[in-house]
Image: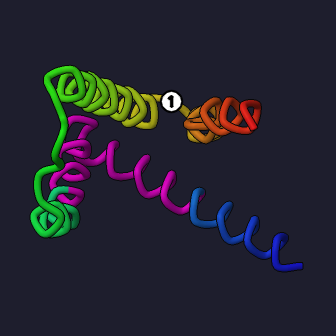
């Protein structure tokens, strides 16, 4: 029963967030929406990152991969917000809901 309620709660949260994102992108545009999402994320996470400090033992390779991941994330989110702006939520939401599912499958396969 708890799993059922948890799944229902997650679905409601996902639907609410997607509908809010869709409406917001139609009002202010995808780039502005992305800028606000990134700004809120920065405000929330910057204090935690400052407290935790700079990780030791990270070289240029790790920083390069971090930059690639950051650019790919921002690009992907911009595409999602643009799709929500011009497309139907009923088409875009199921596609975007699969984000991250390939990683969990590969982790479970390795066990």
Q: Secondary structure at mark 1?
A: loop
**Where residue 52 appears, x then y in whole percent?**
18, 64
**Where residue 71 appears, x then y in whole percent?**
24, 26
Q: Using the image as rendered, state which of residue 33 and residue 59 is in the foreground.
A: 59
When asked about the image quadrant of residue 76, the answer is top left
Q: Is residue 10 left or right of residue 109?
A: left
Label 1 sits on residue: 87
Q: Using the image as rendered, state which of residue 56 and residue 11 is in the foreground.
A: 56
Viewport quadrant of the C terminus: top right
Q: Is residue 78 above or below residue 39?
A: above
Q: Magenta span: helix, strand or loop, mainly?
A: helix
Q: Is residue 37 left or right of residue 103?
A: left
Q: Is residue 19 left or right of residue 33?
A: right
**Where residue 51 appears, x then y in whole percent?**
13, 69
Residue 21 in magenta stretch:
yes
Q: How many other residues sit within 10 Å of disc 1, few (<14), some (14-19) or many (≥20)?
A: some
> Residue drawn 50% across and 30% down?
87
Viewport quadrant of the N terminus: bottom right
When asked about the image quadrant of residue 49, the answer is bottom left
> Residue drawn 25% across and 39% down?
29
> Residue drawn 54% across and 62% down?
16
**Where residue 78 appears, x then y in whole percent?**
31, 31
> Residue drawn 25% across and 30% down?
66
Which residue is outermost to the bottom? 2
Region of the chain picked out in magenta, as a range: 15-41
């Amino acid at each position: 029963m708890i799993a059922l309620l948890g799944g229902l709660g997650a679905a409601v949260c996902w639907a609410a967030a997607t509908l809010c994102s869709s409406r917001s992108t139609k009002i202010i545009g995808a780039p502005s929406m992305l800028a606000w999402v990134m700004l809120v994320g920065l405000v929330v996470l910057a204090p935690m990152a400052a407290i935790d400090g700079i990780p030791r033992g990270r070289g240029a390779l790790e920083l390069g991969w971090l930059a690639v991941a950051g650019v790919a994330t921002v690009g992907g989110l911009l595409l999602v917000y643009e799709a929500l702006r011009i497309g139907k939520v009923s088409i875009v939401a199921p596609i975007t809901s699969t984000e991250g599912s390939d990683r969990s499958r590969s982790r479970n396969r390795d066990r």
